[in-house]
Image: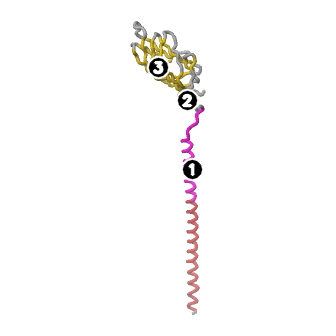
């Protein structure tokens, strides 16, 4: 028995370091599990935050921007009639918020405008074989075209910078019949300074 007693304490001592090592490994493994779990939670939180930022930016950029004016400034004019040499064509608006006074289009604000004019021109007198058609602002000629044949089609489209309080008129240098004239003026970009 003495031999057995001698072997048991020695065997118990050998088991203790073995148990101690197993316990230490378990603690290390458990600590590593906690660390891994914390890393996983941190990574998920970062991805959720990134996703929230991307959604916010996407919603912000996809939302339509609010303009200062909900109304686009424009006018549309149709005219069929006669023109007299040296007199402005008496224009009147068919639709649109830009006002017309005494046959002239009143420019409501400084900015870039898309101007489009289409018409058929018939010269009244046979001895006259040409006519100048002029779109004129208050202080300058905006556009001018010479019409040379008796039955001519006129087409003009341009972007022009116009000034507030300008008035635009259409002039002819000879007596003529104008048919199916359409003139449109649309504000493209307002000068905000």
Quarter of the image where one finds residue 42: bottom right
Range covered by the magenta-colored residues:
41-68
Q: Residue furthest top?
A: 127
Name the residue nearer the viewer: 121 or 28.
121
Residue drawn at 55 percent across, 51 percent down: 51
At mark 3, the secondary structure is strand
Q: Which residue is mark 3?
A: 181
Give the Cα distance between marks 1 and 3. 56 Å
Q: Which residue is mark 1?
A: 52
Give the Cα distance between marks 2 and 3. 23 Å
Count how many numbered circles sit on residues in the image. 3
Image x and y of residue 190, in percent: 56, 27
| 45 part of magenta stretch | yes
Nearer-N-terminus badge (2/1): 1
Q: Which residue is mark 2?
A: 72
Labels 2, 3: front one: 3
Prevailing secondary structure of the magenta residues = helix
Image x and y of residue 41, in percent: 57, 59
Q: Residues within 10 Å of mark 3 (few under 14, many from 20)?
A: some
Residue drawn at 56 percent across, 53 percent down: 48
Labels 2, 1: front one: 2
């Amino acid at each position: 028995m003495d031999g057995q007693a001698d072997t048991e304490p020695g065997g118990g001592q050998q088991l203790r370091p073995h148990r101690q090592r197993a316990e230490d490994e378990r603690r290390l493994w458990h600590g590593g599990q906690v660390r891994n779990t914390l890393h996983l939670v941190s990574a998920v939180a970062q991805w959720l935050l990134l996703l929230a930022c991307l959604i916010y930016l996407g919603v912000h950029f996809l939302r339509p921007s609010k303009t200062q004016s909900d109304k686009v400034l424009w006018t549309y004019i149709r005219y069929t009639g006669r023109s007299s040499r040296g007199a402005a064509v008496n224009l009147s608006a068919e639709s649109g918020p830009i006002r017309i006074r005494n046959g002239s289009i009143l420019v409501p604000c400084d900015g870039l405008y898309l101007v489009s004019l289409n018409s058929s021109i018939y010269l009244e007198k046979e001895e006259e074989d040409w006519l100048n058609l002029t779109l004129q602002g208050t202080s300058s000629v905006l556009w001018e075209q010479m019409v040379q044949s008796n039955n001519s089609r006129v087409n003009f489209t341009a972007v022009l910078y116009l000034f507030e309080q300008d008035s635009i008129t259409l002039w002819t240098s000879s007596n003529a019949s104008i048919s199916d004239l359409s003139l449109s003026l649309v504000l493209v970009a307002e000068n905000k300074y």
